Amino acid sequence: MMTGAVRPRPSSKRIRATLAAAGCALATFSLLCTAFCWIGANYEGQLRLLEPYRPPTVDEAIGLIPIEYALTENESNDVIFIGGSTCRSGLDPQRFENLSGLRAYNLGSFASLSIWGQLATLNTYLEHHPTPRAVVLCMSPVEILRVQADPDVAGGTTAGTLYERFLRVYGPPSQRRSVLADGNDSLRYFINRGMAITKASCTACLDGRMPDRLSEPLYGFGAETYKTLRDKMRESRGFSPLPREHGDGVLALQPPEEPHSVLPWINDGVRGFAALAQSHSFQLIIRLGPLSSTQAPWDHECLPAWLKQLEVEFPRVSVSRPEILWYEPSLCWDAVHVNARGVERLTAHTAKEVTAVIGSRQTTSAGGERIDKDLKRR
């Protein structure tokens, strides 16, 4: 009776060769991942934050245009406006100057850049420009409050989101999260980013030129490019009005549930602005943006108490009152933004508040009288 042939056992030499080949493949893969991750986290291209393999998005452009001005210009301004979209689309520096005689620039971006991104933008401005007499921090009330049971949304972001990328490039070292800040999510983001950057750079070398992504249409903004949008915002001194009289959608605001409190990172960020005012000797004026009067009444105690405490702790902080402005719907683009007529009123209110705190280049009485007349016309 014949038995089946017995397969010979692999020799120790073959085992070692197989293990060596697997080890080399694993080491090569690890080195490539490390290299791509390093490239993704440390890329130095156009404005550093942007990717070379695609045009900027609208959000990237709106976040970068103010800090590009802060880095590349050195002109003097009496007043700086800064904050989110409530600021960027609500305060007109040219109208403000006509009313107050004070030269102003709007460094507003949008809330998703975070209070820390806005603070980094102002800090960069102060490093390259003469210190302004006043900084107006304009925030929407809905950016400030939260229901205590809500999750800490700032802690759930990855190192690859826009505001995290922004702070990696422009923020202080203490706020730069590592590539492993969110484990596999952030690590995978930077590896993929490094691969895309490497591919784009190799393609550009073969073509003999690197494409100018700043001259290509922005994602989601029609034919507008980064450069054309930047030039428009420079001409309007950072002001970016919203199109049409009203937005397509209506943002309905619900009253804050009880108990509610100021978001902790907003509180810390505003205190960072206050500390900057102390160290650079300018006046920080906190102006909350208006809300549509069609919305449910909002907080009556938490915000005023918090703002009052800031004034007590920081001598260079002033709060504009009433803390919340209620505008009729004809002045509102949506529940938290103003339209062109709303811009006129908010800018006039702000001009009156700023000149009351720091005065005007003209006589205070004459400047205040002109602003009062403008407010009555509104």
Image (spheres, helix red, strand yellow):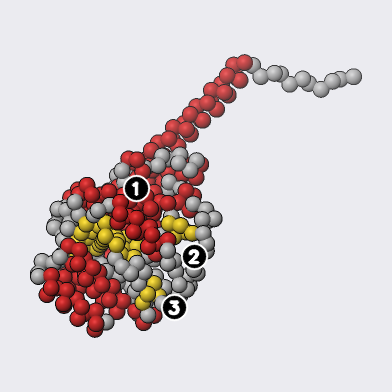
Q: Earlier in the sequence, mark 1 or mark 2?
A: 1
Going by the numbered disc 3, the residue's amino acid type is Thr
Number of dots carrying numbers: 3
> Residue pushed farthest bottom?
377
Q: Nearer the viewer, residue 310 or 72?
A: 310
Q: Residue at x 50, y 45 (%)?
A: 185
Q: Residue at x 25, y 53 (%)?
A: 315
Is the residue under label 2 in contact with that under label 1 (CB below 8 Å)?
Answer: no
Q: Residue at x 36, y 42 (%)?
A: 176
* Residue under pointer 2: 256
Q: Residue at x 19, y 67 (%)?
A: 356
> Residue pushed farthest right?
1
Is the residue under label 3 in contact with that under label 2 (CB below 8 Å)?
Answer: no
Q: Secondary structure at mark 1?
A: helix
Q: Position of residue 18 (x, y in %)?
A: 58, 24
Q: Residues within 10 Å of mark 1 (few under 14, many from 20)?
A: many
Q: CA distance from mark 2 to mark 3?
A: 16 Å
Q: Nearer the viewer, residue 248 or 150?
A: 150
* Residue under pointer 1: 167
Q: Nearer the viewer, mark 2 or mark 3?
A: 2
One can see residue 247 in this view: no
Q: Position of residue 190 (x, y in %)?
A: 42, 43
Q: Earlier in the sequence, mark 3 or mark 1?
A: 1
* Residue under pointer 3: 294
